Image: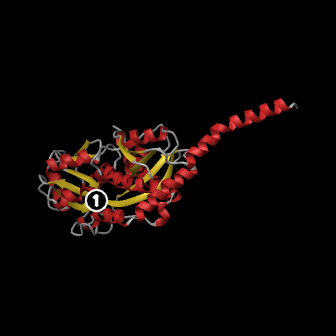
Amino acid sequence: MSSSRRRFLHFAAGAAALPAASRVARAQAYPSRPITMIVPYPPGGPTDTLGRIFAERMRATLGQPVIVENVGGAAGTIGVARVVRAAPDGYTINFSNVASHVFSAIVYKLQYDMLNDLEPAALLTISPLWLVASHDVPAQNLRELITWLKGNADKATWGIVGPGSPAHLCGVYFQSHTGTHFQFVPYRGAGPTMQDLVAGQIDLSCLEASATRPNVVGGKIKALALLAQRRWPAAPDVPTIDEAGVPGLYLPFWHGLWAPKGTPANVMTKLNGAMVEALADPAVREHLTELGVEIPPREQQTPEGLRAFHRAEIEKWRPIIDAANIKPE
């Protein structure tokens, strides 16, 4: 082989390797520009509130701004789809919850696979839901509520964040176990649901306790029961759903962080590290405690921990949702 041909082949091989090498270099330099965190709900709800807490803390670890972008609609699936289609480079990430990543994944016919088309980074928070009522509702406890609903069949309204949302599942379970009937009113997010509940435009809902506690403490709405087996330290006077008379209605509300499938492993490691640092930060922990949010065990704060937890949640809820025959509207 001539020396000129050898030089040509050497040059060609080097040129072919440049794209791969540049991708590696970019991954190693991550992040070198601002990151977009997609929250798939409108501003003002619990996921938006928590997302902004973590986004602000991530800046200190990663050295770049993390900008929250609210992309609501279709029970969170529109925003999640944006992340699935995004470049797998770590600059578009998804902060979301059990509603979009479990319930909507079962109810909606999606163009993506929730478990296989996203890379999990970390399980971040777990908190209870509770059954809340407008102050226009005369009931002061769950038994009085059931009596009132039976006397006003199909007149009461129950706010939900789309079909298959936690509030919807809560309402379906409640109706089937109490013999009551009411109208479901769909919203694009928990924030608008809460606004109408405070204003008396709807009567009832099941909402995330930590985000709605200020309105309960402030006397703007009433909390009738906690959807958990044990009372919540942040509101110890609110009875559990078992104590209130509708046993078995438990709905933990959890949040996690994901990136598009194919995001480089070292980028996922940096994202996970930023989340673990945030959860260990005393100021963040204090803020989460004030909100009434629990931090999951350290072993669940890993990508593998979130993947296993996520899969188990889908396996748990799929037969329940299928049995209830919940469909998109």
Give whichever of 82, 61 is nearer the camera. Answer: 61
Report the number of discs: 1
Can residue 249 be seen here? Answer: no
Left or right of 293: which side holds 239?
Answer: left
Give whichever of 261, 29 is nearer the camera. Answer: 29
Left or right of 51: which side holds 140?
Answer: left
Across and down, in percent, residue 14 comes to 71, 37
* Residue at (14% x, 47% y) in the render: 199
* Residue at (43% x, 49% y) in the render: 64
Q: Say which element carries label 1.
A: helix
Vertically, is 96 above or below 240? above
Across and down, in percent, residue 317 comes to 42, 53
Residue 326 falls in which quadrant of the image? Answer: top left
Across and down, in percent, residue 157 comes to 20, 46
Can residue 112 be seen here? Answer: yes
Q: Quadrant of the C terminus?
A: top left
Left or right of 274: which side holds 244?
Answer: left
Q: Quadrant of the N terminus?
A: top right
- Which residue is tagged 1? 210
Chosen colour scheme: secondary structure
Give whichever of 219, 326 is nearer the camera. Answer: 219
Three-letter amino acid code at disc 1? Ser
Residue 77 falls in which quadrant of the image? Answer: top left
Vertically, is 7 above or below 129? above
For label 1, the crowd category at 10 Å Cα-Cα, with few meaning under 14, some 14 to 19 and many 20 or more, is: many
Across and down, in percent, residue 200 comes to 14, 48
* Residue at (74% x, 34% y) in the render: 11
